[in-house]
Image (spheres, rainbow, N blue to C red):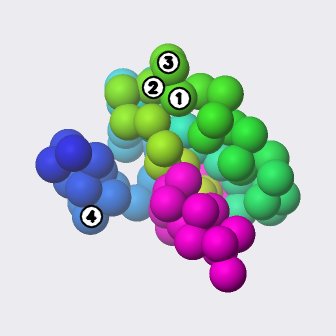
Amino acid sequence: MEEIWFLIGKVTTLDNISQNKKKVVFASKYDSIDKVYKKISFNSSVVNYPGIAIIVNKKNIIEGVITDGDFRRAYSK
């Protein structure tokens, strides 16, 4: 888990972490919530860090992170 925090804290574009693309799910800032949730779910068995998606904009700049826990908390209300 420390590696993912390093990626989030230090990296601003996807170009800088191209060697790590298969470790986490990437989603567009413009994707629907449903689409992001499906990406996280369907890719959970092939990524090193399941349950997390890094959200990027059209210029591939990291905008944020969402986890499966965020979805559970939102739907439990």
Query: Residue 36: x and y, percent?
Result: 71, 49
Q: Nearer the viewer, mark 2 or mark 1?
A: 1
Please, what is the three-letter code of the amino acid marked with disc 4?
Answer: Gly
Residue 17 higher or lower than 23, as above or below: below
Neighbor class of circle 3 (other Cα within 10 Å; few <14, some 14-19, many 20+) is few
Q: CA distance from mark 2 to mark 3?
A: 4 Å
Whether pointer 2 and pointer 3 mark residues with C-beta atoms closer than 8 Å, the reply is yes
Query: Residue 11: x and y, percent?
Result: 33, 56
Please, what is the three-letter code of the amino acid marked with disc 3?
Answer: Val
Q: CA distance from mark 3 to mark 1?
A: 6 Å
Q: Residue at x 50, y 18 (%)?
A: 46
Image-based side of 42 in relation to 20, left or right: right
- Give the camera-side residue of 51 and 74: 74
Residue 26 higher or lower than 54, as above or below: above
Residue 43 higher or lower than 41, as above or below: above
Q: Which residue is mark 1?
A: 44
